[in-house]
Amino acid sequence: MNEFPRTTVGGVSVSRLIIGSNWFLGWSHTSAAKDQFIKSYHDRKSIAAVMEVFFKHGIDTVMGPLHPLLREGMVEAEQRTGRKGILITTPHFNILPDGPADMEPERVFDACKAGGATFCMPHQCITDALMDKMFQKIRDIERYTAMIRERDMIPGLSTHMPETVPYADKTGADVETYIQIYNAVGFMMQVEVDWVMRIIKKAQKPVMTIKPLAAGQLLPPVGLAFVWNTIRDQDMVTIGTTTPDEAREVIELSLDFLGRRLPENQLQRTRSKSSLGN
């Protein structure tokens, strides 16, 4: 079985397709009912079953928060496949005084390290709160990246704001990669798609794109065709899947698009399309 293409981030080899966690943990960006369905569907074993498909294809990089269910599923997938996963954590923590003691940055970063994280990338709710558009910088970022480095993790930034990448590059922020929303319909993106396309192209570090299917608004062949054909060879695509079959489909489609092939994926069959034949 051919291994999925890889890239290097901060000196670490990672798969260019990254396993997302929203569709494991219940963040559908669709409805409260869909969130509840995801939470009721998944447990440690079901998550491990999906990750196992990815791991067997060399897709061993997982992105998500510090969540026991995600970590337990990942450990079981490692045991099933004999392959060690690479964990990208996206924690949140206190950035103002007098917050909960267990959410102090030092304690959160300690927990990330203890949880096996290779990469530690403050979540969007942290990064974007620190953005200073007036002075075009990310406030206090050096403090947090130093703490991450001290714990032998690789720092990056997760963001929804298009300014984050150029500001961090311009100020020489000590980060090795960025998480940036990128999809063909501009879902949750703050400027037009072509602007973000250019930002990714000019980024000084590899970019981990997220939400390629716009939370289910795009068919997999459409959303994946767009992202794989408009990012650089060093960039990555993060995608969440609910079932092992969805994981297989995403992998097959991605390999086709990376190989410049039109996919031969199984089409959906309905009575209204019966006259189209085979």
Image (spheres, rainbow, N blue to C red):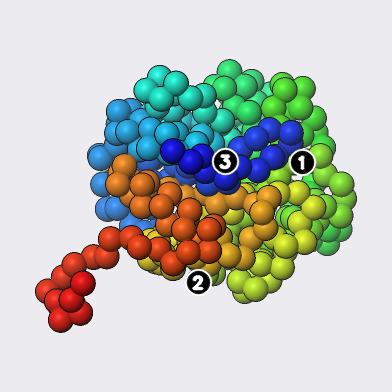
* Label 2: which secondary element: loop
Return the residue nearer the eye: 14 or 137. Answer: 14
Residue type pointed to by label 2 = Val
User: Which one is closest to the eye, mark 1 or mark 3?
Assistant: 3
Taking the spot 52% from the left edge, 28% from the top edge, the residue there is 85
Residue 230 drawn above or below residue 207? below
Return the residue nearer the eye: 272 or 6. Answer: 6
Disc 1/disc 2 C-alpha distance (Å)? 28 Å
Coordinates of residue 245 in the picture (x, y in percent): 30, 47
Residue 197 drawn above or below residue 169? below
- The residue that disc 3 covers is 15
- The residue that disc 2 covers is 185
- The residue that disc 1 covers is 175
- The quadrant holding residue 265 is bottom left
Which of disc 2 and disc 1 is earlier in sequence?
1
Disc 1/disc 3 C-alpha distance (Å)? 19 Å
Coordinates of residue 217 in the picture (x, y in percent): 39, 66
Mark 2 crowd level (few <14, some 14–19, many ≥20, 10 Å Cα): some
* Label 3: which secondary element: strand
Quadrant of the snapshot with the C terminus = bottom left
Taking the spot 76% from the left edge, 27% from the top edge, the residue there is 149
Which of disc 3 and disc 1 is earlier in sequence?
3
